[in-house]
Image (cartoon, helix red, strand yellow):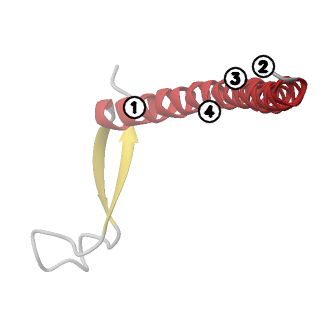
Amino acid sequence: MNTQAITDRLAQKKQELAALQRVRALSESTDAHCLELNRQMGKMVQQYKAVLSIALGWSSAFENAALVDIPQSGPADDDSEHPESVVRIPVEEA
């Protein structure tokens, strides 16, 4: 193998090495971004769980509440058995 062929081959290998180093740096950068994204997604999942827990608590409270119908109009004004407007008030069961 002559000197020029060795020089060309060496230059090619240097270019390949530089390309591999760029790929490695990009891969490390991508890994760092993925880790940060994963961390942020974990935080969002925890916040979502907290919101769902609060919503479940409110849902259970409303399901377990006893509701009382209070007519808006007085009995003398009401000529039907069912008043048109009713206020539903939750009351605690003893």
Q: Position of residue 28 (x, y in %)?
A: 76, 23
> Earlier along the polypeptide chain: callout 3 or callout 1?
3
Above or below 71: residue 2: above
- Tag 4's secondary structure? helix
What residue is shown at x 38% (from left), y 48% (from top)?
89
Image quadrant holding the C terminus, namely: top left
Q: Quadrant of the N terminus?
A: top right
Name the front one of labels 1 and 2: 2
Q: CA distance from mark 2 to mark 3?
A: 48 Å
Q: CA distance from mark 3 to mark 4?
A: 14 Å
First of labels 1, 4 by sequence position: 4
Element under disc 3 = helix
Asked if disc 2 and disc 3 are in contact, CB closer than 8 Å, the reply is no
Of the residues under marks 1 and 2, which one precedes in the sequence? 2
The percent position of residue 19, horizontal first and vertical second, equals 78, 33
Above or below residue 77? Residue 67 is above
Residue 1 disc label: 2
Amino acid type assigned to the residue bearing label 3 in the image:
Leu
Marks 1 and 2 sit apart, C-alpha to C-alpha, by 86 Å
What label does residue 40 carry, if any? none
Q: Amino acid at mark 4?
A: Met
In three-dimensional space, the C-alpha distance between marks 3 and 1, rounded to whole angstroms, equals: 39 Å
Of callouts 4 and 2, the N-terminal one: 2
Q: Which residue is mark 1?
A: 61
Quadrant hosting residue 66: top left
Q: Tell me the kind of residue under disc 2.
A: Met
* Residue at which label 4 appears: 44
Q: Give the spatial CA distance, label 4 vs label 2.
A: 62 Å
